[in-house]
Image (cartoon, rainbow, N blue to C red):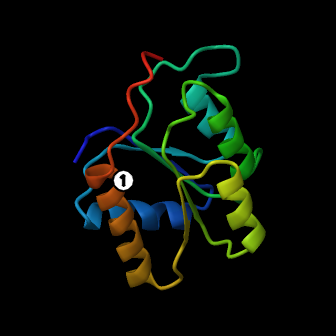
Amino acid sequence: MNQGAILLVEDNPDDEALTMRALRKHHVANPVVVAHDGVEALAYLHGPAGSPAEQPLPLVVLLDLKLPKLNGLDVLQRIRANSRTRRLPVIVLTSSREERDLAESYDRGVNSFVCKPVEFDQFIAAIGALGLFWLAVNEPPPDLGPP
């Protein structure tokens, strides 16, 4: 697997811990950077307001929709509006089963929409499938240049 980072954007500590556990269970060794709200996620990707980002882009973003400060749909829209991040694979990983969230996510350019399974074993399996596809099978977009 490619060893680039995963950006997990998740405000719920229980869901964060469960996602981290699932990644470890499936032997995903990639570093995971956690942002706890939309503003923090964009600061990681684009740099603090008015400053360029200093780190390479992650291989994939796992994005919750219901976030404080800036919701996931707005984060997704800003990712797609920025030339540095517009091709970045973004997977919405949410507990929302609302059809409008699904439609709006795809309208704003999400690569995949995954509802968090309620059952522990199903959640572990879903994260494993995501890791396998997005980190081992998927061909990432070409490097967009230095930050």
The picture quadrant where one finds residue 43 is: top right
Q: On screen, 124 above or below 65?
A: below
Question: In the displayed structure, would residue 23 be above or below residue 81?
Answer: below
The residue under the point 64% across, 22% down is 48
Mark 1 neighbour density, 10 Å: few (under 14) some (14–19) many (20 or more): many
Side of 65 relative to 138 (left or right) = right
In the image, 106 versus 65, the foreground residue is 106
Q: Is residue 77 above or below residue 113?
A: above
Q: Amino acid at mark 1?
A: Trp
Residue 18: image location, x then y, percent: 44, 68
Residue nearest the viewer, comparing 19 with 56: 56
Q: How many marks?
A: 1
Q: Is residue 12 above or below residue 84?
A: below
Q: Quadrant of residue 102?
A: bottom right
Percent position (x, y) of residue 1?
A: 22, 48
Does residue 38 appear anywhere in the picture? Answer: yes
Q: What residue sits 63% from the left and 36% below the top?
A: 79
Q: Residue at x 63, y 14 (%)?
A: 51
Q: Going 73% across and 73% down the picture, which residue do you hit? A: 99
Viewer-proximal residue among 109 and 34:
109
- The x and y percentages for residue 44 are 55, 31
Q: Quadrant of residue 42?
A: top right
Q: Taking the image as drawn, is residue 67 in sight?
A: no
- Secondary structure beneath disc 1? helix
Residue where numbered disc 1 is placed: 134
The spot of residue 21 in percent (x, y) is 36, 65
